[in-house]
Image: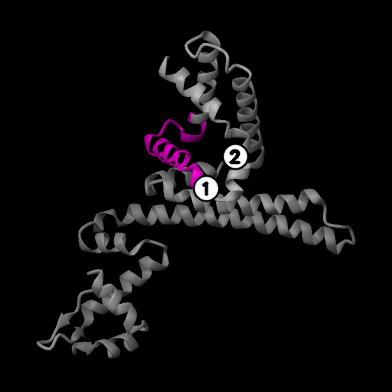
Amino acid sequence: MSRLYRVREFADLAGVTVRTLHHYDRLALLRPKRTDAEYRLYGLRDLERLEQIVALKFLGIPLKQIKALLDREARKLPDVLRSQRLALEEKRRRLDQAIHAIRDAESAIESGKPADVAILSKIIEVIEMQENIEFTKKYYSEEAQSKLAERRKDWNPEMQAEVTQAWTELFRDVEASLHEDPAGEKAQALAARWRKLVEGFTGGDPDVSHGLGKAWADRANWPPTIKEQTAPFANPKVWEFIKSAMSSR
C-alpha cells in the first residue's frame, strides 16, 4: 500500500464509512495528508492507526481517550486495557447471573409448575442491578470503576442483604434519635456506625469516596427505579442529623 488513496477509496479499503473518516478527522484522531485542493489522502500509516482506533473503540474506550493514548500516552495503554477487561468481566458476571435466574424460571415452567414469584423477582432484581451499575458509572473515574469491579467479584446476594439490613436498622435508629444532641454520645455512636458502613463500600479509597459523594449529590436526577429502591434511605432529616454529628465530632 505504497500509494495514497482518496477518502472514498480508503473507506472502501478499510471497511468504514466516509462519514466516519470525516468524523475522525474533525476530532484530530486520524489526520490524513491534504492536496492543494484540500482533498484528503490516506496511506499505510493511516490504515495502521485506523486499525488501532477501531480495536480500542470496540473495547469500549471513548474516542477522546483513544486520541490521548495514541498521541502521547501509549505507556498508559496496559492500564486502560486492564480497566476495560475488568469492566467486561464484571458485565459478563452480571449477565451470567441474569441467565441463571432465567434458566431457573424456564425449568420451573417446563416442569408444569407456575413460575415461582421469588424466581421472577430474582430476574427483575438482577436486571435492575445491572441497569443501576451502568447508570452510576458516570459518577466514578475509570480507576474507581476498576476498584469497584474488582471488589464486586467477591460480592454475593447474601452480603448485599446483610448490608441492606444494616443500613435499614441504622436509618431506623437515627430517625428515633433526631431529638438527640448531635455532639452527644448516642449521636456519635450512630455516626460511627454510618462511617463504618460507608467505608465498607468505599474501602476507604478516596477515588471511590469521591464518586459516591457525586452520586448522592445528584440523587434528584436518578432514574425512578433507583429512587424507588433508595426511598427508605431518603429522609433528609436523617442526613442532616448525621452531617451535624460528624461535623461536631
The numbered mark, 1 or 2, whose residue comes first in the sequence reads 1
Tell me whether the residue at label 1 lies in contact with that at label 2, contact meaning CB atoms closer than 8 angstroms. yes
Q: Is residue 10 above or below residue 46?
A: below
Residue type at numbered disc 2: Thr
Residue at 32% x, 84% y is 18
Q: Callout 2: helix, strand or loop?
A: helix
In the rendered structure, which segment of residues is drawn in magenta?
199-221
Residue 108: name its quadrant.
bottom right
Q: Position of residue 168 (x, y in %)?
A: 64, 29
SS of the residue under disc 1: loop
| In the image: residue 164, left or right of residue 193 | right
Q: Which mark is residue 154?
A: none
Whether 41 is drawn above or below 239: the answer is below
Tell me, for residue 230, which label it has, or none.
Answer: 2
Q: Using the rendered view, name the quadrant where residue 178 is placed.
A: top right
State the residue at coordinates (61%, 26%): 171
**Left-right relation of 178 to 9:** right
Q: Nearer the viewer, residue 150 or 246?
A: 246
Q: Is residue 102 above or below residue 248?
A: below
Q: In which quadrant will I find the C terminus?
A: top left
Residue type at tag 1 = Trp
